[in-house]
Image (cartoon, rainbow, N blue to C red):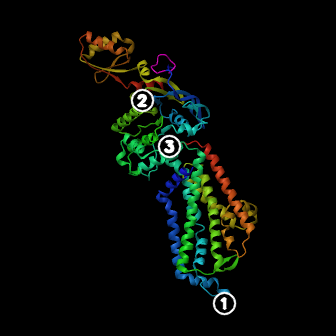
Amino acid sequence: MWQLIGIELNKVFLRRRSYIGFLALFMLVTILQVAMYVEGQTFINLMIQNLKNTFVLEGNLLNGYFVSFLLMNSLWVLLPFLVTFVAGDSIAGEAHAGTLRLLLTRPVSRTQVIIAKFTTSLLYTLLLVIFLMLISLGISTLIFGTGDLVVYSKTLNIFPERVVLPRFFMAFGYAFLGMAVVTSLAFMLSTMTNNAIGPIIGTMALVIGFTIITNLRLVAFETLRKFLFTTYIGSWTLFFDYEPDWSQIRFSILVCLVHILVFFGAGLFVFKRKDILT
Amino acid sequence: MLDVSPFNPNTHRILNSETYIEVKDLKKRFGKIQAVNGLGFSIFKGDIFGFLGPNGAGKSTTIRILLSLVKPDSGTVSIFSLPLEKNRTAILSRIGAMVEEPRFYEYLSAYKNLEMLGKLSGKNVSHSQIMQALTLTGIEERHESPVKTFSQGMKQRLGIAQAIVHDPDLLILDEPANGLDPRGLRDIREVILRLNREFGKTILISSHILKEIEQIAGRMIIINKGAKVVEGNVHELLNASEFILRIEVSAVAKAFELISKAFKQLEPAIDPDDRIIMRVSRKDIPLINKLMAEHDIDVFSLTPVNSLEQYFLDKT
């Protein structure tokens, strides 16, 4: 199994297009960091304008943590697109290219193949999230330094510097879980078609559609919203509430895990019964 | 239906040879299309077994079933005397396969593709084994080139290389000669014959190039509409059949008169190039030659035309 995972990782990382996601993230983060370097102070002043009348705020508020939080908020919508490219291509891309039959005429079980491919897709997603963390948190703190974090999450919260990093690590950890749900969805759809475009577009359509339903605070969608994964995959923001609602976080984690298992299980079910005709 | 199966005493096959593939009453339907319809055949250790049929006859579907890529609706497949369904992994570890047009990870080199596929075969495939497979198929000089730079012919060769890299006992080659030029065809034919004679591989080869089967295979099956038309020894099938004979002689009119009188039932005719053509059995050829000699007619050539092709067309 480890050998199979190694081979799958080789296949992903020896292909140039796998780096598009990393390149896109790097470019966008750099652009946003430059923009914050130029206009960040104005942005901060605007945000704390009202507070300044009441409180005396000292220290470096335009710091790496603040920039990193802004980057996470801004790039959150982009990540699902990037993780979908590899997961959606995983089975369907190989079916389309005709290499799936090459793989399945070897003495490896279909279950092994799908576990290896799924693990590889999750590892790719994990690496993408870690990469985002490194370039947003790492480079931003190098450029802007550190300090207390001022964020607006439901209300304006100010976190002392000493508690900020653990919050970020937990938020990125949850971000991976959220992206793992999207990865699993793309992977499941990938087992159902013989062309990678289908799962990629299908996943994005579902993510966008469900996100719209999640964000439209209509009573009609109230019940439905509880069952949509899009309600939970963005719950990393809960870690930036001053007093995080741990029961809500635990529930969100559980919902994400259930979605991952269901999507993977459905993909396995389909793939094991699939006739390879391409 | 002509039966020259191994159990027929008229065949030349060694009767107690080990059965490598045994297919019984295989059926597979895709929607309204019955791709395979009650197909059955046997392949024995050491065979080069030709798998013939027109396009859409069910050859590729059958091969995909043998490789567990497609699940049959009914019927049984045993390979190396083991039921395929319950012993898939064990069986596939002893098989090398090329299914239709060979596809590879185009961004990887030929060597890297073989290394990766070798690892997946559950055997420790060494560097020398990979190079041996590449040398045998004549592409060793390009082993570091990405597959995307390969011609169709080179991909076909690499397709055979990946099938043999892990030293399997049984090779299943689906249309291995597709897209090859005459030299490529000859080279692939020689590789297949070497694999059988020198390395003792049992080979199932499907082809729509009938001449290929005639030149390579010892036994064959012809299928049509998913069902067996005939199975048996290639030479016996050929000898048992009739074919078109083209005769070039010095005195065409006289020869035609003599042949028409002696072989009226064979319906001889003269083609636009002044050659006599007629449908004959193999045994008729020396009689025609003798008849010409007895009447002092010079025979320039007696040429069978598309023997197996004619046979194939007759049967499908």
To which chain does the residue with label 2 belong?
Answer: B
Whether pointer 1 and pointer 2 mark residues with C-beta atoms closer than 8 Å, the reply is: no
What residue sits right under mark 2 in the picture?
A: B213
Q: Residue at x 52, y 53 (%)?
A: A6
Q: Amino acid at mark 3?
A: Lys
Question: Does any portion of residue A200 appear in the rendered image?
Answer: no
* Res A56 label: 1
The answer as to whether the residues below labels 2 and 3 share one chain is yes
First to last magenta residue range: B5-14
Estimate the x, y position of residue B75 in percent, counting from the top left. 61, 30
* Res B14 label: none
- Whole-angstrom CA distance, mark 1 to mark 3, is 71 Å
Q: Is residue B10 magenta?
A: yes
Answer with left or right where residue A229 lies relative to residue B38. right
Question: In the rendered structure, which disc, 2 or 3, sits on the residue that comes first in sequence?
Answer: 3
Q: Is residue A143 above or below residue B313?
A: below
- Whole-angstrom CA distance, mark 2 to mark 3, is 31 Å
